[in-house]
Amino acid sequence: MTQSQKIYKRVLPAAILLLGGLCMSSCNKFEYHPYQGKFEGEKHLTSSNLRWLEKLELGNNYKFAFISDTQRRYDETKDVVKDLNQRDEIDFVLHGGDMTDFGLTNEFVWMRDCLLKLNKPWLTVIGNHDFLGNGEHIYEEMFGQLNYSFTIGHVRFEALNTVALELDYSTPVPDFDFLEKELIYINDVNKQHPDSIQRTIFLMHSRPGDEQFNNNVMKPFKRYLEYFPNPVCFNGHNHRNEILDPFECGILFYGVTDISDRQYYIVTIHDDSSYDVKTIDF
């Protein structure tokens, strides 16, 4: 070992200890880790927005907006919030996921704070970028469960996690147990009150055929969808507006573009549970 190598061997541990001490003494000034998941402000936003939505007591005729993939687009997100707030005809907003780019804590906080300025209820699903790092757990603390449902008028809304790739297929995605429970619930409701739930709207980030979807379960997913009353699906992820029938069975998937294109959908639900989809530029 040379003399310089001996000096380096003695000095390096001391330098590491000194750097660690400086970091610890400055912990009140610097974020310890961008994926740490510690944040201040509002949490459990899915539950609070569902309570807000319930208080509106919407009937069978209403409108909602569908936006998606707002990651890194804070100016455009602020602008779409302003536009949505000016449209009194819109009753609530659905977000198709990818609020963040890297699943960073601050990204979640920044996007949450943008969307909190909406003057109407808003609900989300998780996107593949939101899963990165510790994103899944940050999302669950900030928003809530990855799968949930609610009913407005004659329509049952099913918000699903369809991002399988980021979980390495270690968790069943989509959650067929959740879908089974929802089918039982809908059938029970319609037995007690015929035609009470006439349509099902599925909200998801990745649709069947995407690289994030577990396409090994496309066939059973299709079968489940066919058991739901008049299903129609809305998804993000692909960064373009499109209407597809991936199963070639009449179940339509409306994909919306990312917010950088400054567009979103307004969906009108009519008394007979039919619907219209209109593209809005802002």
Image (cartoon, helix red, strand yellow):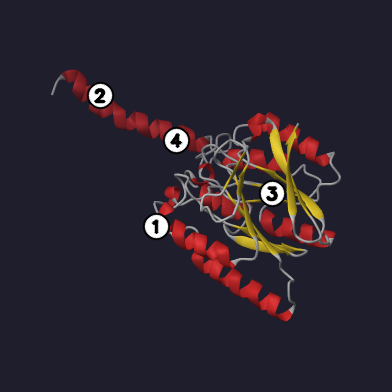
Q: Earlier in the sequence, mark 2 or mark 4?
A: 2
Q: What type is the residue that disc 3 sits on?
A: Leu
Depth-wise, is mark 3 or mark 2 nearer the camera? 3
Marks 1 and 3, how far apart in space? 28 Å
Marks 4 and 1, how far apart in space? 39 Å
* Residue on which disc 2 sits: 8
Q: Earlier in the sequence, mark 4 or mark 1?
A: 4
* Residue on which disc 4 sits: 21
Q: Position of residue 66 (x, y in %)?
A: 69, 45
Tell me whether the residue at label 4 lies in contact with that at label 1, contact meaning CB atoms closer than 8 angstroms: no
Depth-wise, is mark 1 or mark 3 nearer the camera? 3
Q: What type is the residue that disc 2 sits on?
A: Tyr
Marks 4 and 3, how far apart in space? 46 Å
Depth-wise, is mark 4 or mark 3 nearer the camera? 3
Residue that appears at 58% across and 34% down: 29
- Residue 172 visible in the displayed image: no
- Residue 212 visible in the displayed image: yes
* Residue on which disc 1 sits: 170
Q: Earlier in the sequence, mark 2 or mark 1?
A: 2
Q: Earlier in the sequence, mark 3 or mark 2?
A: 2
Decide if residue 174 is on the left or right side of residue 145: left
Look at the image and tell me in which quarter the N terminus lies.
top left
141, 78: nearer the viewer: 78
Depth-wise, is mark 4 or mark 1 nearer the camera? 1
Tell me whether the residue at label 2 lies in contact with that at label 4, contact meaning CB atoms closer than 8 angstroms: no
Q: Which label number is shown at residue 94?
A: 3
Q: What type is the residue that disc 4 sits on?
A: Gly
| SS type, badge 2 | helix
